[in-house]
Amino acid sequence: MKKTAILAVIILFCSVIAHGCIGKPAQSSTEGTESLLVYCGAGMKKPMDEIGSQFEQKYGVKVICNYAGSGHLLNQIELAQNGDVYQPGAMYYSTIARDKGFIDYEKSVAYHVPAIVVPKGNPANITYLNDLATPGVRVALGDPDVCAIGRLADKILEKNGVKDAVLDNTVVYGTTANALILYVSGGDVDAAITWEETALFAPNETAVTAIPVEENIIQTILIGTLTFSENNESAEEFVDFVTSDYGKAVYEKYGFTPYMQGDVGDINETGR
């Protein structure tokens, strides 16, 4: 009788263990652990942080963002061959990624508009691109080999015939748009060419001088899934979420102009 009771306890114990191991759907063991690695240009950190947080709450998928210059991120992607989403600051990098076979699902988010950012009060009286070529003016530019705004500023200066003179006045090169704002707000330079919305990062220390549309090169910001993503469905959902009305409203909140089909960015982009 005693042996029978012991055997019954053993059978019951094994049944409980078996139920715990195989009685639940396989997905429950990994529920909530899925994550997305997003390579995103540093100038878009604020909206992406907010959108990523909301996506996590809605879908239960953790969003891990890697922020850096767009060119630097592309190099990382090519070397690592992993991750789920790429959002650079300019179509130039999106095109390279697509041509290399890294992107397979892509949508437009917003526009990146280059502008001249100066310290509050504009002590050097910078009003036009030509003013950046005035002897003695201290200029900060993005590194054209690393970040989207650096490459684009180079093209804008060349387009307007002031490249050589402005490069002579350039005292520092930043690796991100955010770094350029720090140079301006810290008084290290008299002006920088960076994205107009990044001036919002230091509204009390900086001001924006717009570059006329005919002199400017406006960029369309694209976001796309990476072909080697192991979370294709969630990656596409994230791209859709970023480019939804909600996502575009978040970008607008942080100073970006939301993408509209056929708008000026599509036309101006041909000048990149």
Image: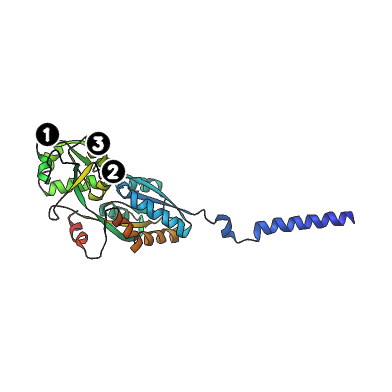
Eyeballing the image, is 149 above or below 136? below
**Res. 175 in view:** no
Q: Answer left or right for 19 relative to 6.
A: left
Mark linked to residue 178: 2
Q: Residues within 10 Å of mark 1 (few under 14, many from 20)?
A: few
Image location of residue 182, percent across then percent down = 26, 39
The answer to which image quadrant residue 271 occupies is bottom left
The answer to which image quadrant residue 135 occupies is top left
Q: Residues within 10 Å of mark 3 (few under 14, many from 20)?
A: few
Mark linked to residue 136: 1
Q: Answer left or right for 135 relative to 86.
A: left
How far, Cα to Cα, is label 2 from label 3? Answer: 12 Å
Image location of residue 206, percent across then percent down = 22, 43
In the rendered structure, which disc, 3 or 1, sits on the residue that comes first in sequence? 1
Element assignment for label 1: loop
Q: Quadrant of the N terminus?
A: bottom right
Mark linked to residue 186: 3
| Callout 3 amino acid | Gly
The answer to which image quadrant residue 125 occupies is top left
Kindly identify the residue that appears in the image at 44 percent across and 59 percent down. 234
